[in-house]
Amino acid sequence: MIPRTIFEPEHEQFRESVRKFFESHAVPYHAQWEKDGQIDRALWNKAGEMGFLAPSVPEEYGGMGLDYLYNTVMDEEMAKLGLSGPGFHLQNDITVPYLVKHASEAQKQKYLPKCLSGEMIVAIAMTEPGTGSDLQGVKTTAIADGDEYVINGSKTFITNGQQADLVIVVCKTDPNAGAKGISLLLVEAGTPGFEKGSNLEKIGLKAQDTSELFFQDVRVPKENMLGEEGMGFVYLMQDLPQERLTIAVMATAGMEATLQQTVDYVKERKAFGQPIANFQNTQFKLAQMDAEITAMRVFVDRCIELHVQGKLDAVTASKAKMLASDLQNKVIDECLQLHGGYGYMWEYPVARAFADARIQRIFGGTNEVMKIIISRELLAD
């Protein structure tokens, strides 16, 4: 096996702590959380106590100022254990970084310490019923009225939407300006006119709360603008590469774990009087998957390395997201087949992995959008 070289000893020590935490506080309860449609809110507070929330937040706001590799460790360990419920990756890799990069000093002082403790869960409301991956087509408006903005519109498929205490809302402050009219506004739960819809029932990610959000004449002060007015689309484009890399990271760790589970299974499961591992078809399938995963691991690790150095470009991140999520779905489908009928039973990890993996090709921008991004660069003059 090709050794991984991107982690230092301190990262591996952190990994051991993270894994023990999840094995004690999440794994035994995840099946119940899948039935509940969301995780126990107390897990956020426990994770905060351990320093597992937003480790990259600067020390002046109570964080540890650690690099993205610590986020990677968290993401990998959740993926390996099949913990699709805790939305920590959204907090660590997506929403809190928006606050760190673009929030005013007053906003940072107000929100970041609560994000670190687990007291405040942050969601980002991009997707709308009629827009999907087309962020320029958002219809939610935020019209200036004196010292306030008045927000009207709706969002859907919002991860952590039910439990969110703060939502970064992608909206049009100038409906006639296209991408240049998009801004990001901070809306706290409980603000009059802001309502959370039902917890959506999904094919997979059953323990992860996913909601519709509704904004009816929601008034927020102009100080709730995140960054500059009209710069929202630029901020989204700057930060989406990390989100897409995170998807690739979790996809790769997830399929590695599923392959190992399958290897263990075929050694024990018998058919026609012998372990199915003895059949050439099984051996060839496993060998093909292992080779492809190895190649993907090397590529994704290189992308992580580039990202830590501040050198990962949007096109390469799109390639990583597309290739890793496509391969994840292919591998898990093959692994499920090798499990036979048992692979279709929800109690088997491969069945849950199969259901959970399908969204990877959709969120963070569909893989078709990734192909558009990649082809634009190829065909540019």
Image: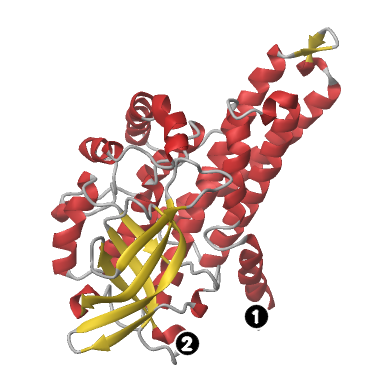
Q: Quadrant of residue 9?
A: top left
Which residue is identified by label 1?
380
State the residue lying farthest toward the top: 273
Q: Position of residue 37 (x, y in %)?
A: 44, 42
Q: Quadrant of the N terminus?
A: top right
Side of 231 relative to 189 (left or right): right
Q: Are marks 1 and 2 in contact (CB under 8 Å)?
A: no
Amino acid type, callout 2: Gly
| Color style of the picture | secondary structure
Side of 205 relative to 218 (left or right): right
Q: Position of residue 347 (x, y in %)?
A: 58, 25
- Is residue 125 shown above or below 286? below
Which residue is identified by label 2?
178
Side of 162 relative to 290 (left or right): left
Q: Which mark is residue 108?
A: none
Disc 1 from disc 2: Cα separation: 23 Å
Q: Position of residue 189 (x, y in %)?
A: 26, 60
Asked if residue 116 shows in the view, the reply is yes
> Quick one: label 1, few (<14), some, or many (20+) residues within 10 Å?
few
Q: Residue at x 75, y 25 (%)?
A: 340
Asked if residue 301 shows in the view, the reply is no
Please state which of the two labelled residues, at mark 1 or mark 2, is closer to the viewer: 2
